[in-house]
Amino acid sequence: MNVLSLLGRNLTQGPYTEPFPFGPAPTAKRFRGRVTFDAATCEGCKICERVCPAGAIRFSKAKDGLAFAVWHNSCVFCGNCEFHCPTGSVHQTTDWHLAHEQARKYAMVEFGLIPNQTCSECGATALATAPSLRGIAPPLSAEEAVTLKSLCPKCRARFLKARRAKP
Amino acid sequence: MSTVPETYTIPVGPLHVALEEPMYFRIDVHGETVTHVDINAGHVHRGIEYLTTKRTMLQNVVLTERICSLCSNSHPETFAMAAEQIAGIAIPERAAMLRVVAAEVKRIASNLFNVALLAHLVGYETLFMHVMQVREIAQDIKETVFGNRMDLGAICIGGVRYDLDEETTGFLVAALDRLVPEIEAIVATYRTNGSILGRTRDVGVLTREQGLACGVVGPVARASGIAYDVRAVAPYAAYDRLPLEVHVLTDGDVWSRAMIRLAEALTAIDLIRACLRDLPDGPTRLAETPDIPPGRAIAKSEAPRGELIYYLKTNDNPQPERVKWRVPTFMNWDALRFMLADAKIADIAIIVNSIDPCVSCTER
């Protein structure tokens, strides 16, 4: 490699670096950035909390349901939560804009709430988690899925047992 | 009237401009010639070995990846190999190939990084910046295919976490095609450039006998005529089905070690291309996350710096009872005593860098 030709190449090509923040910084589609949480599809299995090596994900009982929190200042962006999540409720976006002022350090948290509901069958209070649909054959229809979600765990089991018993 | 003594002791490190990581050398010199070297370690001890026994197996795949940034894929891979050995798991063929792809992409970036630092220590900043820029192609591969510039997150127990689709394969192939001519040009430069040759030829020589006595591994061993490569002598993943070329040089100097690293970067590209050509369809991991029964196992792999050995002992708990790893730098830094003997003070940094020391792996 001739240094002069290298210099010539660099002069004609311009800088290799991205002009960020004055221009866009291209981000790969698979980039593992900020974590988002979708409470509507979460089954509440808490596997993400168990596999998180940094202890950044915490579930806690709240007055009105089950609260989910991922602390981005503890997160190591390993993607273990998304990898092990059976429903894809935990997802890493390509957003890497996580620099923040010191005053906002406790605000770098993604919250989610799986609310309590009243069981449409027995009237008990239970979490409105998404029902686990794996291994259910034949697959549930849309109405059946809505009905199943509105039930408490005991009534869900009864519903599925009755469904299996149908000819 | 006072006189300057002929012999005196100088400290190099623990924080030194020419060292990548904290390491403390107490060097006795006579004039400007090294007479004795004392290596003092432990400055980046973080207690990770203990921490692994407090984390579950699934968490440890991530934790071991963060022991060291440059060989960050080798640690979880070897850890997973040990766990799979205990559980008696064979990973799917596609997963074995994809593990090779991840390991070899890391090898390209790691080797280019060390070769770039050599140019920096020689004082050839233009070449340093250029090699780092070429390495940036490998960094782009990591970010695009795996999602992070250093921690690939490619490994899980029972297979791999990522998969190659048409888009990422296309990007990978195009990036490799750009890398090959660039690395070949770098090889030609290191072969002919007077500044590089003058500072690296016959500097820091480690003979074959000394190398065997120290048990050196990796490029350091292969530059001293010891043809030892775990990928060849104890193949894992898919290496027994790939055209692996083991490069050996006999001079044992700093230059030979750099040339081995560059040659292995090119071989790594051949290996990735062979994997992409033969990549079978099928699952990339086991259908279920496997439970690891009580047991113990030893696994070893060829990290960019040499042979990496993991010992894993599990019991009925989700956490392992003991995890212990022997990293290549542990063997290689012992050989620094031979390499630094009778060296000039100005060459100390170049010689230390030539073993590509990974202090954070060694002291965890």
Image (cartoon, rainbow, N blue to C red):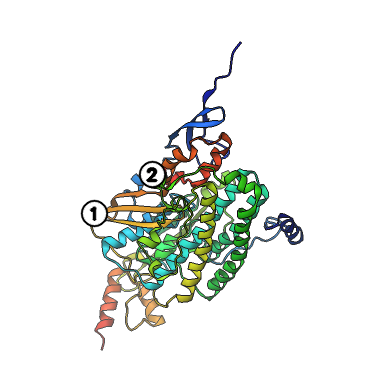
- Please tell me in which quadrant of the rendered image residue A124 appears: bottom left
- Circles 1 and 2 on the same subunit: yes
Q: Quadrant of the C terminus of chain A?
A: bottom left
Image mark 1: chain: B
- The residue at the point 53 percent across, 76 percent down is B166
Residue at left offset 23%, top offset 56%: B295
First of labels 1, 2 by sequence position: 2
- The residue that label 1 is drawn on is B315
Circle 2 chain? B
Where residue A15 sits, quadrant-wise, is bottom right
**Quadrant in which the N terminus of chain A is drawn:** bottom right
- The kind of residue on which mark 2 rests is Cys
Residue B322 in picture, x, y percent from top left: 29, 49
- Label count reads 2
Which residue in the rendered view is the most extreme toward the bottom?
A: A167
Is residue A129 visible in the rendered structure shown here? no
Of B237 and B249, the residue lying toward us: B249
Q: CA distance from mark 1 to mark 2?
A: 34 Å
Residue B259 in the image: above or below residue A86: above
Is the residue marked by circle 1 packed among few (<14), some (14-19), or many (20+) residues within 10 Å?
A: some
